[in-house]
Image (spheres, rainbow, N blue to C red):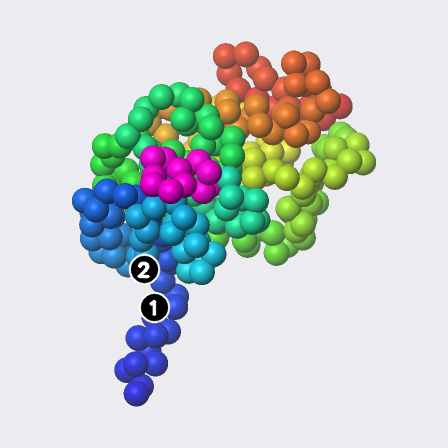
Amino acid sequence: MENKTNENTYDENKKKILAVDDESSIIDLLKYNLEKEGYSFVSAVDGEDGFNKVMSEKPDLILLDVMLPKMDGLSVCRKIRQENVNVPVIMLSARGEEIDKILGLEIGADDYITKPFSTRELIARVKANLRKVEQEGNSFQKGNKITVGGLTLDTDKFEVNVRGEIISDLTRREFEVLKFLAQRPGQIVTRETLLEKVWGYEYYGDIRTVDVTIRRIREKIEKNTSNPKILITKRGIGYYISNK
C-alpha cells in the first residue's frame, strides 16, 4: 500500500505532455523520448480527440500537428485559446511555408517546429516552454505592476492597461514579450535577445517569430499600427517601449 501511494504521488508530479498527431511513427517516437525524459505522455490521433483530451487530461504542454483528420491543428489551437486554456502549444508540421507558421502564432501557438525535426531540438523546446511557464507563475504571484508612459502591465491579472483601456486578450507569449520590453523602457532589445530571454532557447536563427509576435501585440495596443507610439521598431536592430 505504501509503495502504491509513493508511485501515485510521483506520477502526479510529472509534467504531462499531450501529442496530437495522426502518424503512429511520430507518436511512438515522441512517447519513447518524452517518457525517457521523465514526462507523462498522452496522445490523440485526430483533432477532435485532441481537443477533448486537452479539456479532460489538462496537459502541461501540447504538441499539435497542423494536418489532422476531423479538425486541423490550427482550428484545435484556436478552440483551445477560446476556452482560455493557456498552456504552451508547439505546432508540428511537415510544411515549412511561412503562412503556416504565421497562422499558428497568430492564433496563439507558442512555438513551431517543422518536420522532420531532431529529437534533441524538440526536447529542448519542450523544456524551455515548460521552464518559462514556471518562471512566469512565480512572477505573477508577486502582484507587480509595470508602468511605462501610458502603458501599465498587471502581472497578477495578466492584463495590460493602455491609457485607461484594459487589454486582456494577449496570449501568454505576447504578454511576456511586452513585459520584457516594458522592464527596459527606452532600451533597444534585439530579436535574438528576445528569442533567448522570452522563448528561452536558441531559435536556430529564425527571428521571424519575434516579428510576427510584435505585429500581433501592436494590433492589440496601438491605435495606428503603421505609426506605433508605444512599441517602436529600431530598423535593423530590434524593438523598444517608448517611455514618453
Residue 74 position (above or below residue 156):
above
Instruction: Give the residue at the far front of this rendering.
Output: 70
Is residue 94 found left or right of 51 in the rendered image? Answer: left
Q: Give the range drawn in magenta.
A: 66-77
Quadrant placement of the C terminus = top right
- Looking at the picture, how far across and down is residue 215, in whole percent? 57, 23
Q: Is residue 202 visible?
A: no
Residue at label 2?
Answer: 40
SS of the residue under disc 2: strand
Q: Label 2 to label 1, Cα distance in Å?
A: 7 Å
Q: Is residue 244 visible?
A: yes
Q: Residue 72 magenta-drawn? A: yes
Residue at label 1?
Answer: 11
Disc 2 residue type (three-letter): Ser
Identify the residue shown where x is 22% and y is 36%: 118
- Looking at the picture, how far across and down is residue 69, in whole percent? 34, 41
Q: Confirm or deny contact between disc 2 and disc 1 (CB under 8 A).
A: yes
Is residue 200 found left or right of 114 in the rendered image? Answer: right
Question: What crowding class fits label 2: few (fewer than 14 Cα within 10 Å), some (14-19), or many (20 or more)?
Answer: some
Is residue 18 found left or right of 137 in the rendered image? Answer: left
Disc 1 residue type (three-letter): Asp
